[in-house]
Amino acid sequence: MDATAMSKASALSARVLEHLESRGTEATRRWSMAYLKNSTPFFGCKMPAVRECVRTAVEEEEKKPNKKRARLEDSETAGMTTSYMSDAIALLRHEYGESKQAGSILLCEHTSPHVLGSVATLERLEREVMRAENVLTDWSVTDSFAIKVLTRVWKANPQLATRILAYAHEDASSLWHRRCGIVAFVGVFKPNVDASALPANFGLALVDACVANLLASPEERFAQTGTAWVLRYALAAREFEGVRERAIDAVMEHKSLWTTEAKKSLVEQLKSRDDAKLKAEILALK
């Protein structure tokens, strides 16, 4: 963890790390390292254990004698906001995979929607997490942050959805930064999801952002898989006006770019008999 992040954090983040280290097992550590091809070090904790470590540390912090929940007066965060934001960022900036997951959990499950939905919070996350070096370092950490944190940000404040989606169009940004811009909305086209608070025609803009994410680095496996993951739901989204058609056009227009892995992902939600022809066409693209 770098000195700047650590100096802003309280004892909570250090306590989380202590719990993670004590709960880790060698078998889980080896499995995690192999699964992510040694791209990230691990303590050896599975996700339920990570969540429990965060919950325990928060409870311990709250139970300290005469301890009021620390708050920071900080113009960057629009006034009074819990110090858990700094602890979460410190954990996200730590090198171990479980600490990064713990940071996302601390934001998602222990930070109020009022704080998460502020422009100041998103600006801080952009500056200290998404645009910082060696923070979002693999697909697992990135997707966890996008789904747990950024999804809650735009749900708390739908006006920030367009700003988050714009990450996918930033050609000069990292693969992981762009991936955040679309994965944060992976649930929008799923059945029974209420997306009515999003701006008009957001579904069409999301399909376009998926294309932008792909075209920024079509040779990158995780640009392909992130795009296909979101588009698979768009291809099956008949209840969103024009979205399915826009998604089909996007897939067909860039037919020569898709890898076999991505094509299999694209058709995953095409399960009805009416979708059989489209599914076959996508799988046969060259």
Image (tube, grey):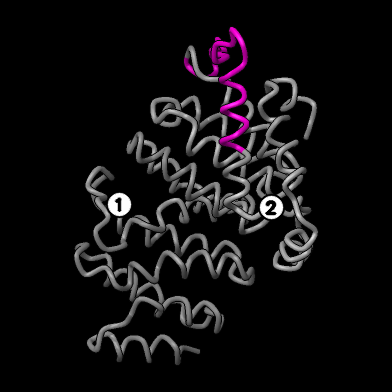
- Identify which residue is drawn at 79% across, 32% down: 2
Camera-nearest residue between 101 and 44:
44
Image position of 11 with respect to 108: above or below: above
Question: Looking at the picture, how far across and down is residue 207, in whole percent?
Answer: 37, 62
Question: Looking at the picture, how far across and down is residue 187, in whole percent?
Answer: 37, 57
- Disc 1 versus disc 2: distance between alpha carbons? 38 Å
Q: Left or right? Give the position of 38 relative to 188.
A: right
Camera-nearest residue between 134 and 168:
134
Image position of 13 with respect to 104: above or below: above
Query: Quarter of the image containing the N terminus?
Result: top right
**So how many labels did they put on this image?**
2
Question: Looking at the picture, how far across and down is residue 86, in whole percent?
Answer: 62, 25
Magenta-tinted stretch: 54-78
User: Residue 177: which disc?
Assistant: none
Question: Which residue lies under the disc numbered 1?
Answer: 202
Instruction: Look at the numbered disc 2 and give the secondary structure of its residue.
Output: loop
Residue 59 among those drawn in magenta: yes
Question: Looking at the picture, how far across and down is residue 227, in whole percent?
Answer: 48, 66
Q: Left or right? Give the position of 98 relative to 171.
A: right
Q: Left or right? Give the position of 39 relative to 201.
A: right
Residue 70 among those drawn in magenta: yes
Image position of 257 with respect to 273: above or below: above
Q: Quick one: label 2, few (<14), some, or many (20+) residues within 10 Å?
A: many
Which residue of the protein is positioned furthest toward the top in this rendering? 66
Question: Which residue lies under the disc numbered 2?
Answer: 45
